[in-house]
Image (spheres, rainbow, N blue to C red):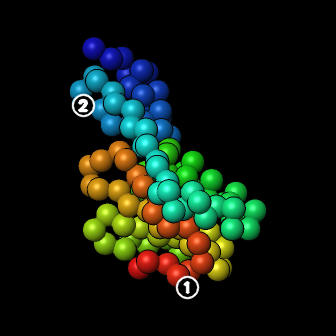
């Protein structure tokens, strides 16, 4: 049985790390992010600041999951697809099926050519 002090610490950790618990069992969800080969090949064509922003987005996806409301112009596109603006001209798109921990970045590039 957990003491009240331990429960407070656990609640604080769950809030900061996005942890799910069932009773006294705690599960830590770490998302796995993959990048499509086409995105990987096109990284060198992107400006350096956009590349850095994409890597920051990927780190946020790993830690917080597919819903990234703090990123500029974030919006769900439907059917487990999401996008946000990296800069005014560049966007990133990713997909994550509900209940899964795998996220796939399927597009990073100019918003004019974005597949949505």
Front residue of 16 and 107: 107
- Give the label on residue 112, or none: 1
The answer to whether residue 58 is seen in the rendering is: yes
Estimate the x, y position of residue 35 in percent, counting from the top left: 49, 54
Front residue of 67 and 49: 49
Estimate the x, y position of residue 50 in percent, counting from the top left: 69, 65
Residue at coordinates 37% horizontally, 47% vertically from top-left? 102
Estimate the x, y position of residue 103 in percent, counting from the top left: 40, 52
Please report whichever mark, 2 or 1, sits nearer to the chain's N-terminal start: 2
Element marked by disc 2 = strand
Q: Please tell me in which quadrant of the rendered image residue 6 appears.
A: top left
Element marked by disc 1 = helix
Residue at coordinates 35% horizontally, 45% vertically from top-left? 101
Q: Quadrant of the C terminus?
A: bottom left
Local crowd size for mark 2, using a 10 Å CA cut-off: few (<14), some (14–19), many (≥20):
few
Q: Is residue 28 left or right of residue 109?
A: left
Residue located farthest toward the right when viewing the structure as drawn = 48
Q: Please tell me in which quadrant of the rendered image residue 104 appears.
A: bottom left
Residue at coordinates 35% horizontally, 56% vertically from top-left? 96
Estimate the x, y position of residue 48 in percent, counting from the top left: 75, 62
């Amino acid at each position: 049985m957990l003491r009240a002090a331990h429960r407070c610490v656990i609640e604080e950790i769950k809030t900061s790390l996005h942890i799910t618990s069932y009773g006294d069992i705690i599960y830590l969800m770490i998302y796995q992010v993959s990048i499509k080969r086409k995105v990987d090949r096109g990284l060198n064509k992107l400006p350096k600041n956009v590349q850095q922003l994409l890597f920051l987005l990927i780190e946020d996806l790993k830690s917080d999951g597919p819903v990234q409301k703090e990123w500029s112009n974030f919006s769900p596109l439907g059917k487990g697809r999401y996008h946000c603006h990296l800069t005014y001209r560049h966007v990133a798109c990713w997909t994550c099926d509900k209940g899964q921990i795998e996220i796939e970045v399927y597009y990073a590039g100019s918003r004019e050519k974005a597949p949505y």
